[in-house]
Image (cartoon, coloured by chain):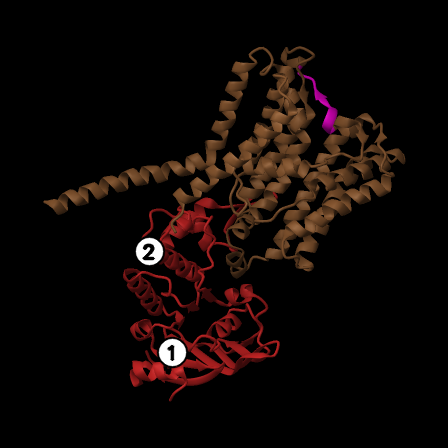
Chain colours: A red, B brown
Amino acid sequence: MSTSNQLLLEAKEVTKYFGTITALENVNLKIHAGECLGVVGDNGAGKTTLMKVLSGLYKPSSGSLFFEGKKEILESPKDSQNLGLEMVYQDLALAGNLPIGENIFLGREPTRNLGLFKLLDFKKIKDLTDAHLGKLKINVKSADQKVEELSGGQRQAVAIARSTAFNAKVVIMDEPTAALAIKEVGKVLDLINSLKKTGVGVIVISHRMDDIFAVCDRVMALFQGTNFAESELSNTNRDEVIGWIMGKK
Amino acid sequence: MDNGKKIIMENKDQEKNSLYLKLIPYFDRYGILLLLLIMIVVMHFLQPDVFLSWRNVTNIFKQISWQSMLALGVFMVIVTAGIDLSVGSIMMLSLMILAIVAKAGAPWFIVVLTPLVAGFLCGLFNGMGITLLRMPHPFIMTLGTLYIFRGTGNLISGGTPISGFTDEVRYLGHGRIDLTWLGLEKSQYLPVSLVLIAIVYFIFWIFMNHTRTGKWIYAIGGNPNAARASGVNVNKILVIVYSLCGFLSGIGALILAGRADSGYPNAGLQSELDAIAACIIGGASFFGGRGTVLGVFAGVMIMGILRNGLNLMDVSSFWQQVLIGSIIVLAVYVDVLRRDLGTRK
């Protein structure tokens, strides 16, 4: 994928301190439409912190975020969602006691007016869920099934479906295949590829070189909270990327 | 050949499994009502003349009237995976404030509003403490306010009962809806408290199942991180839940004022435990996210019928304690089994 596509999200010189610990130092990141960026790094390299800054869960200590060229200050995940930036968390962030449809629309449930009151529109939730799952070719028995009854791969699919249900422009995935059985990994990677085709910018954080080399166009490595290396995928190889993770160039 | 056999067997297994899975939600939802029905039938069989008489049935509803309000409040808190130990004390404090305001000669509509406002503010205090002071668990905050509210109630009243309210103030707890126009006898009246229970439970059923806030309460109980990541303001919802719980305790105080015609220091003593028990029997899970308004109602009814029935049969109240305790343990064990069946691990 060429980088001539529209620039969606840019982080400039992002720094984040937790007390005396420096989690991120002057980190830069760019993501274009229809592109998949792989972010790699050892444990504690700052990958998850960076993603939480991008999604508005953490406020950066300094540095700024630009969305479609415009500077944005994110106060909460709600702000990033409103911009079309969605996050798929490693722990999936699904409520197991709720059905698939209600998880997908959690926090943004469609309602209908009944006099003065706004009541949930369950039919709309079900119809929109069925249509959206169908579009992504995700197979589940029914949108009314509770998430805790699903397999790990199905849960991941629901989490990805939720992130894309509201015309997301950028989707950030934290270790999307970490908890999955091998046969389920392929399905999730297919899902990422189909997102790219619809023009979504995807950021994948992963330890797994197989995933990075299957779906990403570009890879960047963080090391001890700083930008360490970055390359088009076609100009690098596994051994080099693994070296970056260890801090060797 | 062998392969074909295996596949057929697997299919059969799956069919059996899926039928099983299909039945679980119904058992989940209506199993507790079945238990309630069985109890009613058994009690009717044991006390055929008395148990289902108009007088006794209305009596049961009068007896559970204020407990049902506390249980509903505690239920919402338990759905968020929290706990409110202070509901009995909130009710007592609200009742004492009502009594003092009534004795001071305030007009009845002011008197009626005081326990509702007082209860709401007590709940707000709990909610603020849990969220703003970041108490490690609601148990601690509400254990503290269990003492604080009851102590305050005793301080303002001097620890002595204050009795004698006007009929308007007593209406919700003591009022009767005459049904003679239906051709029934004078003694066959409808207690106002029964109608009140029905209305309040219906409103909260709508609230919990058909509004966004209600859905978010369940989501917080299921996975607070998921709710937060979805943009739900978890702390705000928690404050609302504890405030509503206090408000319902205030309604309980108003009902009790009508029933007892008195504000007394021991009002609602240990009733928080009854409220928790009713929720647990009714299928609410302590892990949060599970339980229904209908289930809580069934839980309250089961405890009410058990007490009433055992009283009718002259069983000592010590046995009542043993039985209620046993039912709690049994109900939670059923919950454990249900979780094993329904959840993939």
**Image quarter for residue B322?**
top right
Q: Nearer the viewer, residue B320 or A32?
A: B320
Which mark is on residue B164? none
The type of residue carrying mark 1 is Asn
Q: Position of residue A233 (x, y in %)?
A: 32, 81
Q: Residues within 10 Å of mark 2 (few under 14, many from 20)?
A: some
- What's the residue at 46%, 42% (across, down)? B336
Identify the residue under disc 1: A5
**Image quarter for residue B256?**
top right
User: Which chain is mark 2 on?
Assistant: A
Residue range in magenta is: B172-179
- What's the residue at 59%, 16% (across, down)? B51
Disc 2 is placed on an element classified as loop
Observer-side mark, 1 or 2, equals 2
Identify the residue under disc 2: A138
Q: Nearer the viewer, residue B157 or A81?
A: B157
Q: Position of residue B68 (x, y in %)?
A: 64, 33
Disc 1 is placed on an element classified as loop
Q: Earlier in the sequence, mark 1 or mark 2?
A: 1
Check if residue A219 falls in the magenta segment. no
